[in-house]
Structures are given as C-alpha cells and as structure tokens.
Image (cartoon, grey):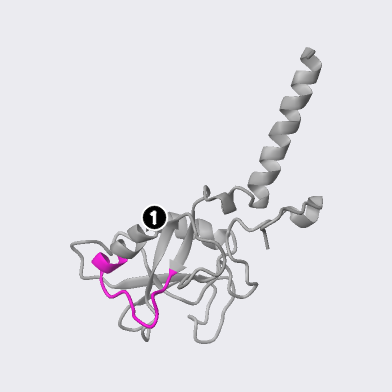
Amino acid sequence: MGVLTTVVVIVIFMIIVAVATVSGYFYYRGTLKEVYVYYPGPDIIESWSEATSAATKLGGAIADMTQLTCAFNAGGQWCNGGWLADGENGPESTSTNIYYPMQEAVSGCGDQRGIIKGTVSGYDGYAGVLVYGVKSKKGSANLKPFNTASGQWSMWDPRLQDLVGLSIPGLS
C-alpha cells in the first residue's frame, strides 16, 4: 500500500471512531461514564453507608458536585433526589442532603431551574443515590432517564444520528 492510501485509511478510521463515540455507540458497549440516579423504590437510601454500597454494586461511585454540574449542563433533568459527595455528606457526617438537576421549573420538583438541594427526611421517601459510572441500558430496574421530560435515557444517547444519517443497530 502506498503512503497516501495508508493515510486515507487511517483518517477514515479516525472519523468512524469519532462519530461512533459521539453518537453513543461506545456508550452502549459500556465505556462512557456519566451521572445517573439510582432509586431503589419503594425503599429509600437513608445513610451514606447505604448510598456508597448501592453505587459500588452498580460499578460506580457516588457522584460529586462537579460531575452533577456537568450532567446538568448537558441537559440532565430528573425529579428524584440522590446522595451526592458534596463536602457535607460523608462517612462521618450526619448530613442527609440530596440533589437533583432540573432544566425547567416543575411544580413539586423544586419549582425552579438548577441543581436542587433537599434532605432525605424532607423528600417524602424518594431518596436515591447519584452514581458516577457506566449506566446500564434502557429498561434497567430502578434507574431513571437522564432527562425525564424528553425521555433521553443517557447523557451519551445518540446526538449525531439525525445529523449525519447514521443508523446504528441497538440504539434507540
């Protein structure tokens, strides 16, 4: 193969990898991490220990405020509060703060836009944990969509599919 042919093949391969990554193909192969809420309903997660245990069982860790802010900036919205490694919560803490992102003010969900802060005791039994890790595929029990208003399952759901006309099997 000539040098020009080799360069063209490498460039085409790099484009395919870039489009597949952005479109969500690799997410569904279990490689991209994000913040998501795990809610074990009808029970609630009442302690830091339970939150840590749940996040670990899911293969992740409790998300921190920087990670939640990134999820919010990427369009995350769910009205289920979860434990967050916020500097107040922790193994030695008595804090029971929970958080959730809202893109729009929704009655009964903080009634404002932004990252909403509440407490386990004031949240009427809907406290989960905000996990930073690879989210399971759509339909997994006790996981909520990345954006409940639009139904977008993951932060990494295909975004370029419509723009470039891709049709990748297994993505919805």
Counting other residues with Cα less than 10 Å from the Cα at mark 1, is it few (<14), some (14-19), or many (20 or more)?
Answer: few
Q: Is residue 30 above or below residue 81?
A: above
Q: Quadrant of the N terminus?
A: top right
Q: Which residue is mark 1?
A: 59
Report whether residue 104 is seen. yes
Residue 76 found in image quarter: bottom right
Q: Quadrant of the C terminus?
A: bottom right
* 1, 115: nearer the viewer: 1
> Is residue 83 in the magenta section?
no
Residue 45 falls left or right of residue 26: left
> Is residue 47 in the magenta section?
yes
* 162, 66: nearer the viewer: 162
Residue sitting at x 39%, y 60%? 58
Residue 65 falls left or right of residue 12: left
- The x, y position of residue 161, in whole percent, is 75, 54
Q: Is residue 105 above or below residue 67?
A: below
Residue 112 falls left or right of residue 95: right
Q: Which residues are magenta?
A: 38-51
Callout 1: SS: loop
Question: How many labels sit on residues?
Answer: 1
Tell me which secondary structure the magenta stretch mostly adopts.
loop
- The x, y position of residue 113, in whole percent, is 54, 73
Residue sitting at x 49%, y 77%? 79
Residue sitting at x 36%, y 64%? 84
Looking at numbered disc 1 in the image, what kind of residue is underneath it?
A: Gly
